[in-house]
Image: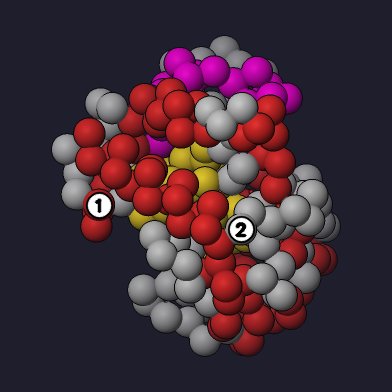
Amino acid sequence: MIIANWKMNGTSENVRTWIEQVSNNIDFKPEKVCVFCPPACYLEFARDLIRNHKSQIKLGSQIINSSHDRALTGGLSAAMLRDIDTDFVLIGHSEQRSHLREDSRAITSKITSAIEENLRVVFCIGEDSDVKKKNETQKFLSEQLEVLKNISLESIVIAYEPIWAIGSGQVATREYIEEIHKFVKNHCQKFHYSEDDISVVYGGSVKLENCEEIISSNFVDGLLIGGASLDPGIFSSIYNLS
Ligand code: 13P
């Protein structure tokens, strides 16, 4: 799975160009799902373009709110995302955890709401540099993964995004990625799923220059790409090389 997370970037014209170019340039493989997560205001516009191009790009939302919070100004529910045929939603991204003070309870509620509407969840986890320096990454990630303990993992893709690698140009080494992805897959077996049922994608400074090495690492099932996904040419090349 190769996921483009545009964060708070782009215009409707950029969305149009991106969908057009990526649809034409990538060599779609059913086992390598391509997911586009534009800002929420462009979701429906992107959905129409994807349909018009008969493209196999899947649509993902960067945000969702718990279905319990009906009186929430600015909220976006799972039912609304389903209504416009969104396929995926990112939950637990470190930027949402820190900017919106999203805690485990809120994340669990969002995941449950998403699954009730048959959305597939990309659940993001990752440690900051302090945790890494203290050698406490695995303990920290175990705590983040606890929210999955009563959830069916069939609808979940886990995205490991070390915070220190996001937007920093400081990509994790192959050995580190393999160690952590292996740990995540093993840990999830506690929730009664086999290693093979659990997809773990990597995010954090993925670029054209490093994508082949990362995707060929053991235990890596895909990529979650921020900055390098904005350019449709670069994103298409990353997809084709991965
Ligand atoms: P960058 O690829 O820009 O480091 O962003 C990673 C990310 O946060 C994707 O969700």
Q: Is residue 91 left or right of residue 157?
A: right
Please state the extent of the stretch shown in magenta in the rendering.
93-114
From the top left corner, tell me how far across and down residue 189 is, in percent.
23, 40
Residue at x 71%, y 67% (from the top left corner): 207
Q: Please, what is the three-letter code of the amino acid marked with disc 2?
A: Thr
Residue at x 26%, y 47% (from the top left corner): 154
Rendered view: 22 above or below 224 = below
Mark whose residue sits in front, 1 or 2: 2
Q: Pick the residue in front: 80 or 226.
A: 226
In 3D space, how far apart are the residues under numbered discs 1 and 2 (Cα atoms)? 22 Å
Q: Is residue 31 left or right of residue 192?
A: right
N-terminal of the two: label 1 or label 2? 2
Q: Which residue is mark 1?
A: 195
Q: Report if the CB atoms under discs 1 and 2 are less than 8 Å apart.
A: no
Q: Which residue is mark 2?
A: 173
Q: In which quarter of the view is residue 36 placed?
A: bottom right
From the top left corner, tell me how far across and down residue 72 is, in percent.
61, 16
Label 1, residues with CA under 10 Å away: few <14, some 14-19, many ≥20: some
Q: Main secondary structure of the magenta part?
A: helix
Residue 49 included in the magenta stretch of the image: no
